[in-house]
Amino acid sequence: MGEGALRTVKITPRIIHAIKNIGDTDMVLIVYANESFNADDPDTFYEQILE
């Protein structure tokens, strides 16, 4: 991944993941989901995996 090497990444359910920009320039990240977040029935949980 990087400038001139754009990628699409599919993250399947129940996979812990994080995004970190290690470059010297700004990063653009476009995220989409197949359903709206439901606060009454959350399926997203925070866990720190990057410093």
Image (cartoon, rainbow, N blue to C red):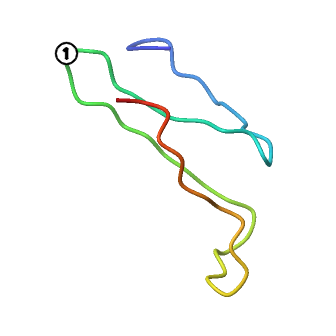
Could you tell me residue 7's position as x and y percent? 59, 23
Q: Is residue 14 left or right of residue 50?
A: right
Q: Is residue 51 left or right of residue 15?
A: left
Residue 44 drawn at (x, y percent): 64, 61
User: Image quarter for residue 26?
Assistant: top left
Q: Give coordinates of residue 38: x percent, y percent.
A: 67, 81
Q: Residue furthest right?
A: 13
Using residue 20 as the reference point, say whether residue 16 is left or right of it.
right
Instruction: Examine the rendered structure and indicate whether residue 41 appears above or below residue 23.
Output: below
Q: Residue at x 50, y 14 (%)?
A: 1
Amino acid identity at mark 1: Asp
Q: Residue furthest left?
A: 24
Of 4 and 45, the residue lying toward us: 45
Residue at 61%, 82% in the rendered image:
39
| Residue in the foreground of this view, choosing between 43 and 9 | 43
Residue 2 percent coordinates (x, y)? 42, 14
* Crowd class of label 1 (few under 14; some 14 to 19; many from 20; radius 10 Å): few
Residue under pointer 1:
24
